[in-house]
Amino acid sequence: MSAKEDAKGRRPGKGKAKWIRILLGVGYWVQGFRCFPWMAVNFFLKDSVKVDSSTLQILQNSVNLPMVGKPIYGVVSDAVYISGQHRVPYIAIGAFLQAMSWLTIVILSQSNISIVTLSLYLLLSNLGASVAEVANDAIVAEMGKSENSQSASSGELQSFVWMASSVGGVLGNLLGGAAIDRFSPQSMFIFFGLLLVLQFLITISVPERSLNLPKSPSNVGIRKQLSELSAALQKPEIAYSIAWFAASYAIIPALTGTMFFYQTQYLKIDAAVLGISKVFGQVVTLLWGIIYNRSLKSVQPRKLIETIQATMAVFMISDVLFVKGIYRQMGVPDSIYIVVFSGVLEVLFFFKILPFSILIAQLCPRGCEGSLMAFVMSAVALAFIVSGYLGVALASYLGVTGNDFSGLPLGLLIQAVCTFLPLFSSSWIPDQKSKTRTE
């Protein structure tokens, strides 16, 4: 049966495929564009609220806690239908919550907004983003199951949404880097809030029946959905893969807040340079999606993930040389290194997600796509939070502060060593895509 045929041997209409790409294209594009207001948040916290590097990193990671609840949102979206629909309404709810949060922050920040109040609304924004992402990811997983997962085209939709997110990231960082010196953070929050209102309006105009999603019973209870998710997680190839993938992030002590202060406070790097660095990283991400779609889909997922993990460690060692001034002595300007190497390293963390998400979509038993994909992203979100807290602890132990970076090279070296460690247990990931289809 052709990869573009449904279960009855019929090809889905072009109109239905168009609606899927519109809905997911907008959703993932906005998801990538979220870096635009978050760049403003970082500078707002540093320059207006006057937080230190550790507080900034703790807040950056703590407001991601709603991401950990993704399995709950996934189970609910799988089991609870709203007006006969169980994907599109949740995308709309997510967009609404985000728009309300950012526009409320604008109103409250006209006076002296406390860091607690700001954190609460950022949490609400990330809750909305999590709900929308779960629904979007579930649609991608369901469409992946409706295709012939053994064909070369099984990753086309995954690659499409990956590239849509990357394009959003490129524009978000490009505009963010230019806007941060010309407009107030509140102006950037308003712009993003209105963009979310537009996404909400587009989403509610798309009837779910036009997406041609695989049919599933509308009376499936939450308890049954949890039971199916539990059964899926008991499969060794799924459980071990997710455990390794999450641990490969959690074991790395992230020093993002410290590096942000090092670049802006110590090196006096302009915000526009940081924006260009992120744009460069997003362009590389976009190219990665294109290259994967054209040339790497047939490569075993484990081999790709191992290669990416090792490359991350090499880039971290390069950061050690950068902080010690080796590249500067070689005539490489700090701004060039930050644009190229720092930009690539930041997105390398996410390169593994593309081959891994395709692997999990194929491993996923039919009927709990939303729940399982949500569990995966929840595990990744929790891993990033743990990684961030470990980074704060490491920086504190080494005495690294917003004004003293003498212990930063050692911290980066420890980070690189920790990144290498998961390679010794990568056998937990299945190495044969042909074994992944689960009915």
Image (cartoon, helix red, strand yellow):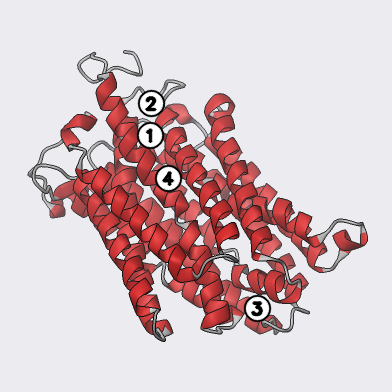
**Relative to residue 386, is residue 369 drawn left or right?**
left
Q: How many other residues sit within 10 Å of disc 4, few (<14), some (14-19) or many (≥20)? A: many
Please give the residue where the numbered disc 4 appears in the rendered image. 29
Confirm or deny contact between disc 2 and disc 1 (CB under 8 A): yes
Label 1 residue SS: helix
Which labelled disc corresponds to residue 149?
2
User: Which tag, 1 or 3, sits closer to the chain's start?
Assistant: 1
User: Which tag, 2 or 4, sits closer to the chain's start?
Assistant: 4
Confirm or deny contact between disc 3 and disc 2 (CB under 8 A): no
- 390 up-or-down from 179: above or below: below
Quadrant in which the N terminus is drawn = top left
Please give the residue where the numbered disc 3 appears in the rendered image. 395
User: Which tag, 2 or 1, sits closer to the chain's start?
Assistant: 2
Amino acid identity at mark 1 = Gln
Comparing 220 with 172, the one in front is 172
Amino acid identity at mark 4 = Trp
Comparing 346 with 125, the one in front is 125
Q: How many other residues sit within 10 Å of disc 1, few (<14), some (14-19) or many (≥20)? A: many
Amino acid identity at mark 3 = Ala
Would residue 224 be visible to someone looking at this image? yes
**Relative to residue 5, is residue 395 drawn left or right?**
right
